[in-house]
């Protein structure tokens, strides 16, 4: 396994990129630590697959360099980089048995047959495919096929990283859970460096220790699931993660307070410099308290989604969502208050730190 | 980084990071070199199609070359291109009605055959792709065997059959005779494309209250439009290139152009220039058709069966 | 696909049935009719039983034509199928080269068969043809009119010229249907060019190759027009294939009974061999 450094990587699919718009990947400068489990999360077209293909060497970046354990691999071919990749749709060699599928990458590299046999048997155990080793790969189900693709990566114990490109897209919902937890187990046991591309936040948050959120060709935040939830660095992260997403409203900040229409909201601290441009206040529905005191709102809709209720309300003419417990009552004259812990201030969509 | 593995008693594999030894590094470097351009296409791939196309074009070029020469030049000094280009050979063809009527005859029976073949094949292909019925498999196989029938076997019986109906030397006779191999082909191609359309579409349409003919024309046909195009292309192709039957069934009024070509073996010996010009002119309709369908050729040749 | 049982579907097949019955069954009946009768002219026929069949099956002429035809089919299959695959593998996958290649390669397929013959008849002539003239100039004693070997070479090269494109286009259609991810995965697995061909491309071309082999076998076994125009079956009988022989027998010698019996045997053999090809190849496919 290796540490992967992306040094100022930019990529454009067209031949002569002029403005930022021509870049599918604007600038990525980030390190994937050895043995880490990362998720690349973002909507379609945000550049996450582009980044993955640059790491695997299926694409060469227009600018910047890529290092594996400090060694420059930018100009190396996929074959030389020694990585594994699992694709969106299972790629298997139809005419081979499951066993031969797993042996294929080793045999291609001239590994002696006894070693091949040993490694393949181990991998069959790891992926739970042992009882179908002699079956033709053609007739298997989608999740079994995807396990074979994964196994072809695991079988080479010296791979630098295992990359996943939305690997659960074609898998049945109940099997998704099973496969995801198996992946996590494998990671815990063997400590592979794993990079997992997905647009599904649940998948990213449950799989990875570190989630890399991408938006319009840029990394907007890297952090643990908790960090992404509580301190979204960019309003996009606020919207994209959490259900419903973060409430974001334009405000005017003066010292330790923010003004929205006729209301004044106390902030936990005074936002540090750079509060020019568009200033917004973001608060997750989980931190909006609905009760008898605070700022007046008018409730439009209450959605009961099981463990809690989502209250859709109108606050100073804008939509706001709040989460209340299943058993809590909704007051007749509802008022809201913001929990200071959950308040974030954004300048031009980027979060600003607040002093004490 | 090299990695060592050890199997412990309980069968689990432990992996440990160890500092790479010098030998391991060399071995890795050798492997990396071996893997470098593995599986990539050669940079000279374009040579193959280029050489093949040159091989295909040379005989055609020679025909075109000859068509612009006079008979004296052809039989005289050998030259790679016409020294005194002339269109006299083409003028011969365009001023002689029996020549250009040959084209019209060919086009008429080819178009008739294409329309008939595809029109009758459509419902049959639908039946084969959607329903099971008594003897369906045998029927399908029997249809395909007709594609295997050598035209030479049928030439004489066709002559007698169409004579009996007084159809000799009519366009319809050739069109019907060519159905022998084109109808099975059309059924087969269309069945492939139709089987690619999910059955749910039919069922949804019936639930929405479409009658069968309306469903077939309004909903189903657009879905298999490319298949119909491919079937038409193949029917056109095989009817256009076939000559044995076409020549047997015609004498003058419906004689195809390709048959008229042999007339150049006339009293004054072979008129090579006119023969070449006629040959070039018979290649043109085919070239034109290919040009129109060029974007569908790749998909079409898979006959909906990839 | 799950198909429902519906005997009314027969009505949809009826037009095809009537049409093919008219253009296949009735003529075939005539053939059968001739094959069991003999005539002394004046339209007086009498029952001949299996006489004609026995004569055909014991005639060296028939078996020689059969052997020539089998050899011809085998040779062109051996050349055209691998060559077609090889060319298809090296075709451009995108860009302006694709339509150019496809259009130029498809061109020979749409040339009327006797024109194909004419093109090669002219091309191979030693006095006015580029090929014959060049070969002569290079010192080869090439003459397809007099030399059986040269005649065979000419007929085979002509068929390769005429039909290899069909194999190319079929294989190409199979190849472009392979998703990019397969090639990417193969790169990651470090597969060699051969392994990519053997384990990814060949399995995906299986079905179109079956079509290619069947079509090429059937059409080469029925070949008539092209060699007839070029060599007329000669020199001697060396390029007289079954169809040429059949037409000679029926129209040249007006030996209807024997020609009819030969037609039936010929047709049955094509069907039998096609069936064998089909079964072997689908069985191989299923086993894979």
Image (spheres, rainbow, N blue to C red):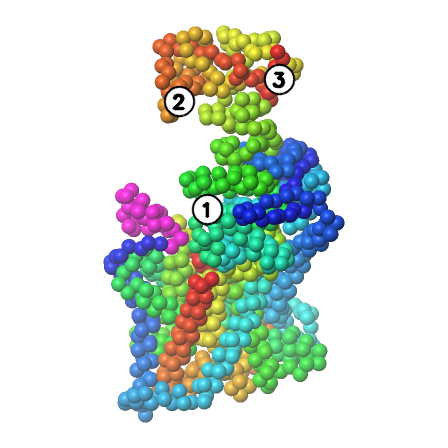
Q: Position of residue C4 (x, y in %)?
A: 28, 55
Asked if residue B222 is among those painted magenta in the image, a careful observer would answer no
| Label of residue A353 in the image | 3
Q: State the predominant SS element of the stretch in magenta.
A: helix
Return the residue found at the far right. Answer: B22
Question: Which label sits in the foreground, 2 or 3?
Answer: 2
For the residues labelled 2 and 3, the Cα–Cα distance comes to: 31 Å
Residue neighbourhood size for the residue with mark 3, other residues' Cα within 10 Å, grouped as few (<14), some (14–19), many (≥20): some
Residue at (34, 50) in percent of width and height? B199
User: Circle 2 sits on which residue?
Assistant: A308
Query: Along the polypeptide, which appears first: circle 2 or circle 3?
Result: 2
- Whether tag 2 and tag 3 are in contact, CB under 8 A, the answer is no
**What subunit carries mark 2?**
A
Looking at the image, tell me whether mark 3 or mark 1 is earlier in sequence order: 1
Q: Which residue is mark 1?
A: A143
Inspect this view and state whether residue A100 appears: yes
In front of the other: C258 or A170: A170
């Amino acid at each position: 396994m290796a540490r992967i450094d992306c040094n100022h990587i930019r990529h454009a699919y067209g031949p002569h990129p002029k403005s930022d718009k021509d870049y599918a990947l604007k600038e990525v400068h980030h390190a994937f630590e050895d043995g880490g489990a990362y998720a690349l999360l973002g909507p379609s077209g945000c550049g996450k697959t582009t980044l993955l293909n640059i790491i695997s060497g299926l694409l060469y970046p227009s600018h910047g360099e890529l290092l594996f354990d400090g060694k420059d691999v930018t100009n190396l071919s996929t074959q030389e980089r020694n990585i594994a990749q699992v694709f969106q749709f299972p790629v298997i060699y139809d005419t081979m048995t499951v066993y031969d599928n797993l042996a294929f990458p080793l045999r291609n590299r001239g590994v002696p047959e006894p070693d091949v046999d040993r490694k393949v048997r181990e991998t069959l155990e790891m992926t739970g495919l042992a009882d179908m080793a002699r079956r033709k790969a053609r007739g298997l189900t989608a999740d079994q096929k995807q396990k074979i693709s994964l196994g072809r990566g695991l079988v080479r114990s010296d791979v630098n990283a295992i990359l996943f490109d939305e690997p659960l897209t074609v898998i049945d919902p109940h099997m998704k859970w099973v496969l995801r937890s198996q992946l996590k187990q494998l990671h815990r046991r063997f400590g592979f460096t794993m990079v997992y591309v997905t647009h599904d936040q649940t998948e990213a948050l449950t799989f990875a220790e570190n989630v890399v959120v991408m938006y319009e060709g840029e990394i907007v935040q890297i952090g643990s699931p908790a960090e992404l939830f509580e301190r979204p660095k960019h309003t996009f992260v606020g919207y994209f993660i959490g259900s419903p997403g973060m409430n974001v409203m334009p405000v005017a900040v003066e010292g330790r307070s923010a003004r929205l229409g006729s209301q004044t909201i106390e902030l936990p601290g005074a936002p540090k410099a750079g509060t020019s441009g568009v200033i917004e206040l973001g608060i997750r529905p989980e931190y909006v308290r609905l009760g008898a005191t605070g700022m007046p709102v008018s409730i439009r809709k209450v959605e009961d989604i099981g463990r809690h209720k989502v209250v859709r309300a109108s606050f100073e003419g804008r939509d706001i969502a709040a989460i209340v417990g299943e058993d809590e009552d909704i007051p007749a004259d509802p008022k809201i208050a913001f929990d200071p812990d959950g308040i974030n201030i954004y300048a031009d969509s980027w979060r600003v730190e607040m002093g004490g | 980084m090299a990695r060592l593995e050890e199997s412990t008693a309980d069968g689990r594999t432990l992996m440990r990071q160890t500092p790479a030894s010098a030998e391991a590094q060399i071995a890795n470097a050798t492997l990396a070199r071996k893997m470098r351009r593995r599986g990539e296409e050669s940079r000279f791939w374009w040579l193959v199609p280029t050489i093949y196309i040159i091989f295909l074009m040379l005989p055609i070029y020679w025909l075109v070359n000859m068509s612009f020469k006079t008979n004296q030049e052809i039989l005289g000094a050998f030259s790679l291109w016409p020294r005194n280009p002339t269109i006299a050979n083409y003028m011969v063809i365009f001023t002689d009605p029996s020549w250009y009527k040959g084209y019209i005859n060919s086009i008429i029976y080819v178009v008739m055959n294409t329309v008939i073949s595809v029109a009758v094949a459509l419902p049959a292909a639908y039946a084969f792709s959607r329903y099971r019925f008594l003897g369906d498999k045998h029927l399908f196989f029997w249809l395909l065997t007709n594609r295997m029938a050598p035209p030479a076997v049928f030439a004489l019986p066709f002559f007698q059959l169409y004579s009996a109906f007084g159809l000799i030397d009519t366009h319809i006779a050739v069109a019907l005779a060519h159905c022998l191999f084109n109808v099975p082909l059309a059924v087969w191609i269309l069945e492939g494309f139709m089987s690619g359309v999910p059955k749910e579409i039919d069922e949804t349409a019936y639930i929405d209250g479409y009658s069968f003919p309306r469903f077939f024309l309004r909903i189903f046909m657009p879905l298999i439009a490319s298949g119909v195009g491919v079937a038409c292309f193949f029917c056109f192709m095989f009817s256009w290139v076939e000559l044995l039957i076409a020549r047997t069934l015609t004498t003058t009024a419906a004689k195809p152009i390709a048959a008229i070509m042999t007339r150049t073996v006339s009293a004054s010996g072979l008129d090579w220039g006119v023969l070449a010009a006629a040959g070039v002119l018979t290649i043109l309709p085919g070239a034109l058709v290919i040009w129109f369908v060029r974007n569908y050729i790749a998909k079409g040749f898979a006959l909906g069966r990839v | 696909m799950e198909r429902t049982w519906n005997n009314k579907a027969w009505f949809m097949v009826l037009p095809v049935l009537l049409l093919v019955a008219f253009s296949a069954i009735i003529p075939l009946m005539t053939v059968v009719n001739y094959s069991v009768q003999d005539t002394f002219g004046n339209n007086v026929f009498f029952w001949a039983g299996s006489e004609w069949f026995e004569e055909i099956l014991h005639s060296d002429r028939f078996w020689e034509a059969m052997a020539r035809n089998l050899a011809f089919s085998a040779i062109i299959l051996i050349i055209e199928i691998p060559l077609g695959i090889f060319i298809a593998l090296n075709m451009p996958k995108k860009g302006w080269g694709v339509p150019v290649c496809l259009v130029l390669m498809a061109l020979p397929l749409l040339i009327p068969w006797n024109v194909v013959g004419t093109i090669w008849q002219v091309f191979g002539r030693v006095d006015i043809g580029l090929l014959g003239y060049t070969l002569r100039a290079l010192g080869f004693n090439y003459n397809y009119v007099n030399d059986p070997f040269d005649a065979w070479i000419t007929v085979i090269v002509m068929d390769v010229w005429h039909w290899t494109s069909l194999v190319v286009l079929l294989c190409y259609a199979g190849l472009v249907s392979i998703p990019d991810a397969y090639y990417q995965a193969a790169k990651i697995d470090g597969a060699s060019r051969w392994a990519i061909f053997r384990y990814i491309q060949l399995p995906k071309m299986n079905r179109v190759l079956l079509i290619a082999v069947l079509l090429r076998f059937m059409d080469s076994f029925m070949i008539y027009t092209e060699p007839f125009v070029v060599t007329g079956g000669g020199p001697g009988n060396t390029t007289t294939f079954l169809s040429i022989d059949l037409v000679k027998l029926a129209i040249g010698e007006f030996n209807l009974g024997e020609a009819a019996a030969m037609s039936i045997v010929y047709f049955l053999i094509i069907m039998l061999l096609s069936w064998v090809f089909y079964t072997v190849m689908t069985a191989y496919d299923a086993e894979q």
